[in-house]
Amino acid sequence: MTPTEWAGIIGAFAMVLGPVTAVLVAVIRLRAENTRQHNENRAAVDAKFDEVRDDLRNVNKAFDKRMDKLEDSVVDAIDRHESVHHRRWWRSF
């Protein structure tokens, strides 16, 4: 083969290899970007989940506190009722 033919073959090979290399580089960059975005989204979802879980815990604590208060109030009202309306007349002496 003559040097001109070799130059043509090398040129054709370079014309094919250049775009293939560019596509491979672009795919590698896209994959890296995609992985980064997934990691950021996973971290954001985890943070939001933790926030919601903490909110639910706070609501549960507030509800428990309110129910305890209500229970104490009802017990006090029943005790008052019993002492006022159901006391025996002979215990008053």
Image: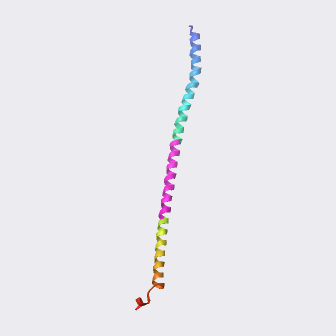
Along the line of sight, which residue is nearer the eye, 28 or 75?
75
Image coordinates of residue 20 in percent, x first then y, are 57, 25
**Magenta stretch containing residue 63, yes or no?**
no
Along the line of sight, which residue is nearer the eye, 55 or 80?
80
Displayed quadrant of residue 24: top right
Q: Is residue 88 left or right of residue 20?
A: left
Residue at 51 percent of width and 39 percent of height:
35
Displayed quadrant of residue 90: bottom left
92 shown above or below 74: below
Displayed quadrant of residue 4: top right
**Residue found at the very far top of the displayed protein:** 1
Along the line of sight, which residue is nearer the eye, 66 or 78?
78
Q: Which scheme is used to colour this image of the protein?
A: rainbow
Q: Quarter of the image containing the C terminus?
A: bottom left
Residue at 50 percent of width and 59 percent of height:
56
Image coordinates of residue 62 in percent, x first then y, are 49, 65
- How many numbered marks, from 0 up? 0
**Magenta stretch containing residue 46, yes or no?**
yes
Q: Quarter of the image containing the N terminus?
A: top right
Most common SS among magenta residues: helix
The region drawn magenta spans: 38-61
**Residue found at the very far bottom of the displayed protein:** 93
Residue at 58 percent of width and 25 percent of height:
19
74 shown above or below 38: below
Residue at 54 percent of width and 34 percent of height:
29
Image coordinates of residue 28 in percent, x first then y, are 53, 32
Image coordinates of residue 77 in percent, x first then y, are 48, 78
